[in-house]
Image (spheres, rainbow, N blue to C red):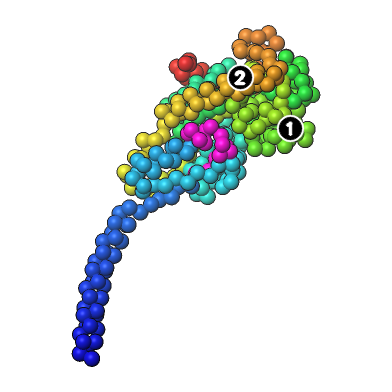
Amino acid sequence: MDNEISTFFSIGALAAISLFGCSGQSDNSSEVASNQEVTVLRFSHFYPATADVNKEIFEPWAKKIGEDSNGRLKVEVYPSATLSKADTAYESTVKGTIDIGSQVQGYTSGRFPLTQIAELPGLSNSSTQTGCMLQTLYENGTISSEYEDSHFLFMFATGPGTLHSADKLIRTPEDMKGMRIRRPSAVAGDIIESMGASPVGLPANDIYTSLQRGVVDGLSFPWEAITTFKLDELTKYHTNIPFYSSALMMTMNKDKYESLPDDLKKVIDDNSGMALTKKVGEMWDRTDLLGLQAAKDRGDEIIDIPDPLNDPDWKGPLLKGTQKYLDDISALGLDAESVYEKAKAASVACKV
């Protein structure tokens, strides 16, 4: 019995020591956990998970944010418009429904009218050049007022949108008369109308089924996107012309950004801006060439019109569409002509 009592007290003493020791460790662990609190940032975009821009830009960007913050920031990437629709990502970011969003400005008609001046034909022949133009116009204050309700990260652009059709080759604007052509933005819509075609607004994710069902007869789209959205399965005729450019942006909810400590704000800022713009441009210029080569390898019919503003068939309608867009923006009380001149200056400076 004495041995049992002795054993009981020994176990009790050990338990007490263990309890006090665990209590001390728990307080310390709590302090460490508090110091290493993880902030999750939900990032939504409309590109498929398999798209080059997701694999080569967005996911590595998210990983680097995590590494540079020593794990205190975690960016969760949601592709394929699963967290916000393709045409609402910017507003969803502003409202805080998502923390970070990427969207084509042209998907929200009239929301970014000055930015879209940089999409006009004749200003650029590459993703790198257009992205540089856009980021330059943002950084010098020409278009920054259009993004004041969010924390801006960086601007970028697709390669030139070329013309693609399922049923016939478009050699001149005359060939477009009566056709229903998918348009990505008001800029491209004005130009398509100037050709005598009917522009149809559709997010990229909806083009395949619309083309398949005959809702549209053709589209204007970069070569890379033709492959990304599997439209190479439906289009066999291509007019390789720099018809327009598409601006895109990546922004962050302003309140979410402001809630971060200064060192984490710096992590975000250090991974934003022109360097990222140029990285996207280089990637898309490379993949555009691959998309074009794939069409050649399939035996698709292709016609090249590299300088449409100096082509007698295309110059008139393109300039007409350009002027219509500038006039519409001027009618809103905005200085469209001044922004157009600054865009042309940025185009020269960004030419590669």
* Relative height, residue 99 to residue 323 (above, below): below
* Residue type of the residue flagged with mark 2: Gln
Judging from the image, what secondary structure is the residue with disc 1 in? Answer: helix
For label 2, the crowd category at 10 Å Cα-Cα, with few meaning under 14, some 14 to 19 and many 20 or more, is few
Q: Is residue 76 left or right of residue 23?
A: right
Residue at coordinates 45% horizontally, 25% vertically from top-left? 278
Towards the viewer: 233 or 74: 233
Towards the viewer: 274 or 69: 69
Tag count? 2
Q: Quadrant of residue 26?
A: bottom left
Report the Cα–Cα distance between label 2 and label 1: 22 Å
Q: Is residue 349 visible?
A: yes
Residue 113 percent location from the top left of the image: 57, 31
- Label ID, residue 23: none
Q: Residue furthest bottom?
A: 1
Q: Quadrant of the N terminus?
A: bottom left
Judging from the image, what secondary structure is the residue with disc 2 in? Answer: helix
For mark 1, what is the residue? 211
Q: Is residue 57 left or right of residue 224?
A: left
For mark 2, what is the residue? 293
Q: Is residue 117 visible?
A: no
For label 1, the crowd category at 10 Å Cα-Cα, with few meaning under 14, some 14 to 19 and many 20 or more, is many
Residue 77 percent location from the top left of the image: 50, 44
Q: Is residue 46 magenta?
A: yes
* Residue type of the residue flagged with mark 1: Leu
Give the magenta range: 43-57
Residue 161 percent location from the top left of the image: 62, 24
Residue at coordinates 22% horizontally, 73% vertically from top-left? 17
Residue at coordinates 76% horizontally, 28% vertically from top-left? 217
